[in-house]
Amino acid sequence: MTLVSELHPVVLKAGTDEASRTLQDYAEFWKIPYRMNLLEPKGSVLFTSDRSIAAESAIHGPVILTPVGLEEAEKTASYAGAAVTSEKKLVRLPVRKGITVSLRTNVYEYSGQRIEPLLVSDGATIMSRVLGSNVHLVGLDLVTEYARLIHEGYEQIPSRRFSLVAKLPFSYQSIPSFIRNRSFRTEKGLSDLREENLGPVECLRAVFLASLVRIAGPIPRIGFWRRGKAYALSVTHDVETQDGLENGAKILMETEATLKIRSTWNIPSDRYPLTSPVLTILARNGEVGAHDTRHDGRLIFLSGEEKKRRLASCRARLERLVDQRIRGFRAPLLQHNKDLAEALYNAGFEFDSSCPSWEVLSPTSLRSHGVGTIFPFYMRNILEIPVSLPQDHQLIRVAGQKPSAAVDLLLKLATWIRGVGGACILLIHPDYEFAEAENKKEYERLLESFRSDPECDIMTLGEMGEWWKTRKEARIETNDNKVSIISSEHSHMSSELQAELVTGYSGDGFSVVNL
C-alpha cells in the first residue's frame, strides 16, 4: 500500500448501455479506479457521454463530456453558448517523449467567448473548458469511434472472389503460390503500415486518460506488463507444411534456444501427418496452439455449430498428440469475426490470435483491414491477442522485400509499439525464408533486438493470455489517498502487477511514476 497526494474519484455515467460499456472499456484498459453510474462522491470528476447528465452533475463538480454524434455536438455547443464545426482530421497526441499515437476522425471544434482550449493536437482542439462552468468538452466522439474501430474492425467480410475460390472442390492451396501471391499484391504497398492504421484505438484511449489527468490530477493505474517491463513480445509460428514442421522448425528453434526464447507453434490438426514426438519437442521449446484442421480457408463460411465441431475436433486431436491442454488458436489466413470468436469459446479455447492490428491486404476480404489496437482485448468472452506486426509472408512473398529489409521494417514498427507500451506479436512461418540457412543471421538479428532489451517482457501467447487475465481481474483500490492492488489469490503472476501513478500530461506525453 502506497500513500500519495490527494486523489479525485472518477465516476463514469452514460445515457445508453453501449456508451456505458465503452466508457468502462476505456477505464478497464488503463486499470484506473472508477465508479459506474453511482452518485458522485465529494471531489469526484465525472466522465459522461450524455449532455443532460453533464448539465445536472456540473453543479456539484468537474464534468468531462464526449458527445455522441454531430447532432449531439451541435446541441452541446448550443448549451454552452458556443459554435461548433466538424471536420475529418488527423489527430496526433504524444504518449511519451518522441512517441505519438494518431487517428483520422471527425473533430468537433467548439468556439466562442466562453470556450478555452485545454488540449490541442496540430492546431485542432481536442478538449475545451466552458468558462464559468465545471464542464469540459472533448472534441472526439469516443463512443462511436471506439465501436467503429474495435467492433466493426473485428468483422471480416469475405470478398466475392475469395468466396468463390474457397467453395471450389479443391483447396486454394492447390493454386501455385506465385499466382496466389501475385493476386494478393496491392498498389498501396507497405506505406500504409503507419501508427494511425496500426493503433488508432490507442489514440482514443490516450484522449480519455489525458482528459481525466488534466482535470482530475494524478490518477493511479496498473502497469501493462510484469514489474520492470515496458512492453511485450510473443514469437509465433504458423506451421503450414510438413516440411516446415520437420525441417524449418528446427532451424528457427536453434536460434530461439540460443537466445532463450520460447515460442508458440500453431499446428493444423489434419493437413499433414503428425506424430507425438515431433509435437512434444515443439511444446518443450514453448507451446503448441491450434491452426484449424485442413487450412483450406473455409472455416469462416461454416455455421456456428459446424465451426464449434471443427474447432473442438482440432483441439482434441492436438491434445492427444501433445498430451497437454491446447489453450490458443490462430485461424488460417488470419480469418476472424464475432461468430468465430464465440465458436472458439464454446469449443474450449481461452484465447485467439487471428486478428491483425493492420494488414495491408487481407487474403479473405482483399482489402486493407485491421482491428486498430496493439493490445489484447476481450471479444465474446475470448481474449483476442492481435497480430501487431506484419507477418513474414506478406513482407517477403507478397510485398517482395528481402529478409534484411523485412527485419528493418519489423524493428522500426516494434520501436513504436515499445514506446506505446504494447504487445509485439511476431508471426514467422517455418515454411518460408526465415527458416532457410542463408537467412538465419537475419532471424537472429530480429530476435536479438528484443532479447537484449531488459524492458521487453518475452512470453508465449499462452503466458500472455494468462498475464492479461491476471491484470483484468485485478483492480486499483484507493482509501484515504492510499493506493493498493487487489488481485486474485489464484494467479502466480499477481505479485508481478505494478501500481503506477500518472502524475500529468504535457507535450512529452504522460508523466508516470511507479508506486
Image: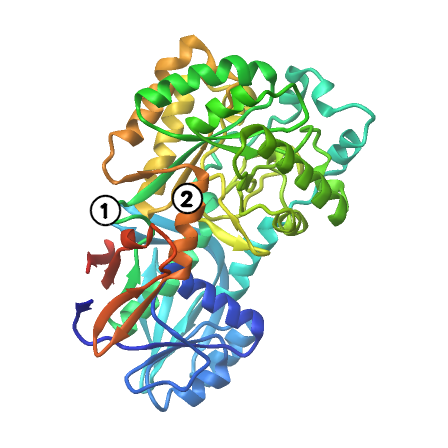
Q: Secondary structure at mark 1?
A: loop
Q: Which residue is mark 2?
A: 464
Answer yes or no: is residue 325 visible. yes
Look at the picture and state if 272 lies above or below 466.
Answer: above
Where residue 120 appears, as percent x and y from the top left, is 33, 62
Q: Which residue is nearer to you in this view: 233 or 172?
A: 233
Lateral position of residue 457 relative to residue 20, left or right: left
Question: Tag 2 or tag 1, which sits nearer the N-term?
Answer: 1
Single out the residue that lies furthest toward the right.
169
Look at the picture and state if 60 lies above or below 260.
Answer: below
Q: Which residue is nearer to you in this view: 111 or 385?
A: 385
Look at the picture and state if 511 lies above or below 165.
Answer: below
Q: CA distance from mark 1 to mark 2?
A: 16 Å
Q: Which residue is nearer to you in this view: 57 or 2?
A: 2
Answer yes or no: is residue 431 visible. no
Marking on residue 228: 1
Lateral position of residue 500 relative to residue 309, left or right: left
Marking on residue 470: none
